[in-house]
Amino acid sequence: MTQPIYAAITGWGSCMPPAVLSNEDLSTFLDTSDEWIVTRTGMKERRISHVTATELATLAAKRALACADLDPADLDLIIYGGVSNEELCPNSASGVQISLGAANAASMDLNTACTSFCYGLAAATGMIRTGQVRNAVVIGTELISRYMDWDNRNVAVLFGDGSAAVVLEATENQEGMLASMLGCDAGARDTLRVRGFGCGYSGYGITLGDTFWDFDGQQIFKRAVMGMSRASKEVLAHSGLTADDISLVVPHQANLRIIESVAKYAQIPMDRVMLTVEKYGNMSAATVPVALVDALEEGRVEPNSWLLMPAFGGGLTYCSLLVKWGNRVTPLGHTNDQLPPCSESALTLVNQIRKNQDPHGRSKAGLLAPVFPEERLNRAYPVD
Ligand code: UT7
């Protein structure tokens, strides 16, 4: 009988843009305050990228490959998880592929909003375990600053840019993602919609990418806690583990209060929860992998320990992954590649984006007007 194949996480790397946007910076153009943002969300800072999403993703993937000591030419699969892709065709994964020189890889994008990395990790693990590929790079990257509605304080204070990646490789050791629960609370999909971002918005004199967010924060909050908690409970029960077996929770970081509620429900003390929300905010698909890389770099991942990764996002997708870490918690190698230096402050970068949004003063009006009756939105694009 052949040995079962598992998908070990053998490499990890992140790429964080250096420019830091503080709560005080946000209050220079929004009616908000450091006190409101900290008490309601736990966030103090977030990063704003001066480079493209592909550059962030490529460097994160290079660092992960060096960490695993895997030659890009030997890579079988690239999964690019995210919702802020620069283009839809060609896909973003192929942009990373060409920059890495991973000539023999298959490349796909995966968008389940903030859960995209976690769904990607589950998909790549499945492909390795069924023998379709021998290894994969899974990336979570977001450049939300470029399609943020910077006039809307309900959303503009919450998000940031960033990227991280992991390398998965086939192994006979029982490690890597060993169980997952993926779900989607689709009945609540209207609680988070980015109007103006997608081909369904063409043909109305709208500047594509100049957005208006439908965002029901309180509904999303409640459903996020429910979805992440339910998924975590199920994944633990399915694996015959209890909260005591989990040495570190690496959750999606949309709000400190959401994380505290999920930890309370799972009966896991907060000192076993990795937190990055204060310094990076919500980076959507990049959040979980960046937190994982930070946890490794801070020595918080023990060899052979159990990790739990609950996440949720637009859709409203949710999930929880159970990961058994392997023996190694240190990189095999490093790359010397760096991002080009950033000469602007984060506030200057944001003000440049704000200036370029809505150049004709008509886009927002178009998006706010009922150009999309509900039945049209649900058909994805309007057809007369
Ligand atoms: O990854 C998926 C992304 N989605 C999420 O993460 C959303 C999850 N939801 C949340 O994290 C929270 O619901 C928020 C942080 C978005 C909002 O916190 P909240 O405690 O639910 O506040 P709220 O929406 O009930 O608003 C309370 C007040 C309102 O004023 P009034 O009506 O009480 O006068 C808002 O207008 O706070 C006001 N407010 C703000 N004030 C200052 C809303 N945003 C801001 C702001 N600064 N940025």
Image (cartoon, rainbow, N blue to C red):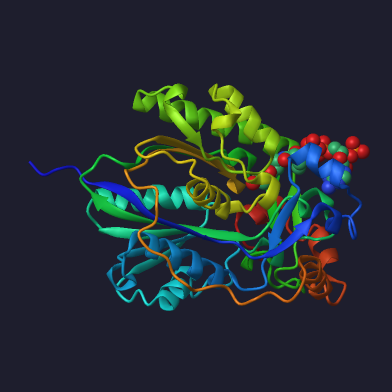
**Residue 148, above or below 189:** below
Please determine whether, in this image, residue 104 is positioned above or below residue 373: below
Marker count (numbered) = 0
Query: Residue 89 location, x and y as percent?
Result: 51, 74
Residue lying furthest left: 1
Locate residue 281, reporting x and y percent: 68, 50
Q: Residue at x 55, y 40 (%)?
A: 251
Query: Residue at position x 65%, y 60% from top?
Result: 161
Q: Is residue 129 left or right of residue 363?
A: left
Residue sitting nearer the eye, 142 or 56: 56
Residue located 45% across and 77% down the image: 99
- Could one spot residue 196 in this view of the protein? no
Judged left or right of residue 259, residue 338 is: left
Question: Which of the 4 quarters of the picture holds residue 265?
Answer: top right
Q: Quadrant of the C terminus?
A: bottom right
Q: Position of residue 204 (x, y in %)?
A: 75, 71
The foreground one among 201 and 42 is 42
Q: Specify the quadrant of the image occupied by residue 94.
A: bottom left
Q: Quadrant of the N terminus?
A: top left
Residue 233 on image: x %, y %: 48, 26
Q: Please tell me which residue lies in front, 204 or 245.
A: 245
Q: Quadrant of ligand 1?
A: top right
From where the camera sits, is residue 353 visible? yes
